[in-house]
Amino acid sequence: MAITRIARAGAIAAISALALSACATGGTDAPGASGDCAPSDGPVTLTFTSWLPGVEEAVAIWNDENPDIQVEVQTGPNGNGGTYQNFFNQLAAGNAPDLGQIEFDAMPNFRVQDGLENIAACEGILAAEDQFVGWTWSQVTFGEENAVYAIPQDTGPMAMFYRADLFEAAGIPVPTTWEEYEAAAVQIRELGGYINNFSQSDINAFAGLVWQADGQWFSTDADGWTVDLTGAETTQVAEYWQGLIDNDLVAVYPPWTDEWNAAYNSSELWTWVSAVWGANTIASGAPDTAGNWAVAPMPQWEAGASAAGNWGGSTTAVLKGSDHPYEAAQFALWLNTDADALTAMNRTANIYPATIAGGNLPVFGEGLEFYGGQNIYEVFAEAGKNVNPDFTWGPTMTQVYNDVADGFAGAVSGNGTLLEALTAGQSSTIAALKAASIPVKE
Amino acid sequence: MTTSSVKKQRRPSRSGGIRESAVSRTVAMSVMVVATLYFLTPLWWLFVAATKNRPDFTTTAPLWFADFSLFDNIAALLDYRGGVFVRWLGNSALYAGVGAALATLFAAMAGYAIAKYAFRGRETLFNVVLGGVLVPATALALPLFLIFSQAGATNTIWAVLLPSLVSPFGVYLSRIYAAASVPDEIIEAARIDGAGEVRTFFTVATRLMAPALVTIFLFQFVAIWNNFFLPLIMLRDENLFPVTLGLYVWNTQVSQIPDIRALVVIGSLLSVIPLIVTFLALQRFWQSGLANGGLK
């Protein structure tokens, strides 16, 4: 832990320095400065860009209760689908919204490009840390002292969805380690099914598996970023799945397609190691299998361990240049901690809150019919606590995802391997960082 | 051209028209049939998928019908988020309809002027316009965003409508067509009869140029209707989205709400109908236009 703290302290210096060197428009941002977050005089209207379906419902509750701080919702495609680029364009043009939804993996990009307001000095923000699942807070502070750049909104703790009925009928024990998982895969293959589908395009899901294995793709210190897409843990994970692919033990349907859904629906696929929000994906895509699914913790690399990965999750950030950071911060905190707001966002967009108390909301307290009456959220709540808090995302994740996905697509069709794709991603990532004038260590 | 192909063309045919052997006709027909199937299959899939209810959507054969619930699906689409989809269709019609009509008018005026009036810098002007044909619209979207930001006009109707009024290709086509189909003598005659230049343009020239104008309108209409990048960059307010952007935004929300996928499919089906209708309605105009061009 001590070592991580030192590394984090280095990260503070590095990221702050980067923010200033990478951006000509440094502005008045003084890291650690406090007391410069005062309420505005008179009524305020805030703009808030989010792609959460139905977020207006939660915002309406706020607007009713706060006539002097009205929030106007703007919308767009999901972050990597265009909204992040829009944010950067708007920041360049000086008309960014006051608040924006930003996923955890994109936060460093905005920090490095100096696109975020530090709201640590705003009333109640620093004190809110205790309300949030531990790892999410380090994602919005980057480990800097006296700094908070966003309020965590939702998380995607990972677990294993599996077909309880098929495992039972075949007499195969539900795997608890990756070794057992592979053994089960062989047995399932003999029965004509596949244990899982390897997603060639969801690189952030693969990152979740690496996260579980304690891998670190990025780290920073005073000298710059270290990129490590091919570290020991990543190699272990990549070679494990490469083995499953090579031996035809996993299917390789393009994810999120009809054929992928159909494979689940026809009971060809037996498990899906995925995030909490995947619960709705299966229920919607494989309606014929209702009642037969269950959820167990992710298989472990070491028997008896309880590590979990995370796939997805976002924050509500106050964007640079907001005229009303105080009000924006208050709204962001309310939106992501208020029970009514969280319940509304869960109803309209299946949001799984990043607060500790959020996991105890009534909506998460019941067994689900699709999962044989199991209260699957207990498993995910437990997983959320077991996510390594020190995982760091890099500042060019969109590019990383694209570059690695190219190689992964080849790997599933027999051209190259996952590890080769990651190796290529490693060098293109370093090139991308250099091209963006972000210091990088090799 | 080799001598053999010349010979082939000269071979006399009994019926007098252009005749091909049975073999080559069969080959040509089968190529056409395959190509037709290839292009129509996605549309067929779209139609079939739009008629299915949600469970059937992933559980039944993708290219054949299950329970027919097209109208329920349309009702669900029109009901979702307060019927915002209808608004998107209206926005698309506004951007594409008004945008294409004005773009056609401006292009016709510019093309006619370049073709029929001698003035200094005419060729330079035309070359600049031709250069504009080569610049992809996507490359202009970001500079346009920065300009509109300065003017405080992003996230308004104008942000999408104004850039749509420009059609360099339309100017090019208008010039070529006006030069070929509007004889100088007719313009002279109109002048002698006392018509002003503006009146001559609107009452005489536009009629002679009609096939080209319909073609320009159609091209521009389709281009604006399908334009996605400009609205993506310019618009934040859901109520201003054209249907392409709206459906794209929904499609990126599928991981949050898988059910939206069905709405995206039905919305896609409905969104291509106006294009098909426009094409069919204007077909005879531009068909005759293209044929005329071939004869001249």
Image (cartoon, rainbow, N blue to C red):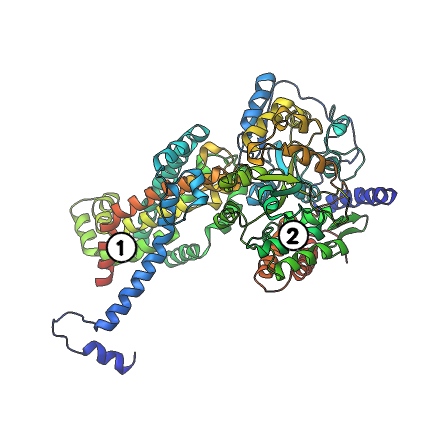
The quadrant of the picture occupied by the C terminus of chain B is bottom left
The answer to whether B15 is drawn above or below residue A129 in the figure is below
**Residue A36 place in picture, x, y as percent:** 75, 27
Compare residues A245 and A114 and report the one nearer the observer: A245
Q: Out of A125 and B155, give the one closest to the viewer.
A: A125
Image quarter hosting the N terminus of chain B: bottom left
The part of the image, by quadrant, that contains residue B48 is top left
Question: In the visual, does B22 lie left or right of A277?
Answer: left
Q: Mark on residue B251? A: none
Taking the view exactly as shown, the residue that stands out farthest to the bottom is B3
Q: Residue furthest left?
A: B15
Instruction: Tell me where residue A352 sits by quadrant.
Output: top right
Left/right of residue B155 with respect to residue B221 in the rendered view? right
Residue B111 is at least partly visible in this image: yes
Crowd rating for badge 2 (residues with CA inside 10 Å; few <14, some 14–19, many 20+)? many
Q: In this view, does B82 lie to the left or right of A412?
A: left
Q: Which chain carries label 1?
A: B
**Which residue is denoted by mark 2 in the rendering?**
A184
What residue type is disc 1 on?
Answer: Ala
The answer to whether mark 2 and mark 1 are in CB contact below 8 A is: no
In-front residue for pair B113/B33: B33
Q: Mark 1 points at which residue?
A: B178
